[in-house]
Image: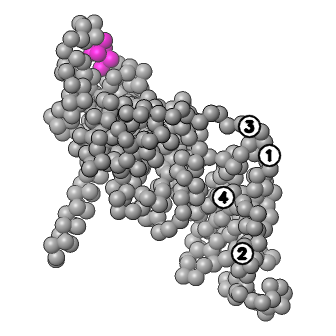
Amino acid sequence: MTGSAVRSLGVEVADNDRRRSLGRCILVPVANPASVRPLMQLAADLVDTAGEIRLLTVLRPDAAAEAHADAWQGMAVAETIAGQLGVTARGEVRTEPGLGDAVLDTLRERQASMILMGWRGASSTTDVFGRLIDHIVGRSSVPLAIVRAGAQDYDRVLLPISADHLLPGGSSGLQLAADLAGRLRRRTTRPLTVLRTGQLGQELPAALTALGDRVHHDPRRTHQAVAAFAGATDLIVAPVAPTVSGLRAATTHLAWASPDATLLVAIDVGPTAESPLAPALADAGRPAPGPRRLQRSDIRLVVTVRLPEGGAVGPDQVERVLARSGTTEHLTAWWPTDERRAHVRATVQLVAPDVDGAIARVRTAVQEAEELAGAEITYAAAEEDDSSELERRGIAVYEGDLTVIGDLPDRDPSRRSGPRSR
């Protein structure tokens, strides 16, 4: 075995060991009593069966006796909540001048495997998560889960994946987010939603597609896609590497796009060459976008379904599913070369406030269709010439048959003896 192969194997073994130990010891710093219950619920969902939860409140040396009494009372409440959730937590109160350094010291002393922290969901022009959390993020030696609690308890996990996450630089952050999403979905009542954003490229790893029962694809930017998919009872697990571009995509923009959902930013360990984190959000100081106008209008969406393997679902079944949300037209289907799965495309016309609202309606119909389990679905606003694009390429469906006509001078399939490809 070559030296590079040995190093690669060593990295892979180390990553597997880290994933197995992710929930071994979760450190939960507590600063705001109002955040204790949602943080404890997430910690209970993430911790291993034989793992432990360590709670920490840090006070400054000049804190009054009343502050110490309140801190210990808060630890007792948190331990009680943990017991109600079926896990064990142990709290401690430390007195140190540097709050962030106290968290890092506790991390090392308790040999924690992950840090779980609450975030108010806003950034400034100088801080990403706030000065204290930024200090910890930039120096942590273990993965972090930074959470903005939603308006309601979550019942579905949403995992957005962009093309950047599939590159070598983003793979570790994606793996962490997938690990956390897999743990968190165990308490949910609805299937986990895998949401691809940006342009399609390489295949998603099987371990990712297996997290949900189908894959949804929105070619827009991640925060735009999440705005169409996320609801108040969703938990968004945002993959991110601790870099300027990664933090910008996964923090403020997602917080704006999903104001009512729970947002968990998964950061794969500490300092990078791009520290400090202050410049990570160029738009952090700008106000959030105003509320969208609810004036309803006709929206046309092009929906492409990459069918499940096995050939049990036909174009006519896809059209019936899409027709539950609107009027369908321009049904086309094809089987790409060297592909094991057929594709079906249709335009859906419906009345909605905007494209996001239209996607939400169609996505609901698609998600509820049991026959589309295992499919990959792409949503895009229709362009004027979308309906004729495939016809120009000689691809169509006739009487429910999946047919590729080929590049013929005559487009009339009735003059053909049969389908070119099935």
User: Could you give the CA–CA distance between mark 4 and mark 3, rounded to whole angstroms?
Assistant: 20 Å
Q: Relative to residue 72, is residue 257 drawn left or right?
A: right
The picture places residue 87, in percent across and down from the top left corner, at 33, 32
Q: Tell me where the magenta segment starts and ends, as one range.
A: 70-75
Quadrant placement of the C terminus? bottom right
Picture layout, residue 91 above or below residue 362 = above
Picture layout, residue 195 above or below residue 40 = below
Mark sitting on residue 297: 1
Q: Nearer the viewer, residue 382 or 23?
A: 382
Instruction: Answer with mark 4 or mark 1, whichever residue precedes in sequence.
Output: 1
Estimate how packed mark 4 is, as few (under 14), some (14 to 19) or many (20 or more) residues with alpha carbons within 10 Å: some
**Picture residue at 79% right of the left edge, 78% below the top:** 398
| Residue 73: in magenta span | yes
Q: Report the residue marked by disc 4.
A: 380
**Picture residue at 66% right of the left edge, 55% below the top:** 366
Q: Secondary structure at mark 2?
A: helix
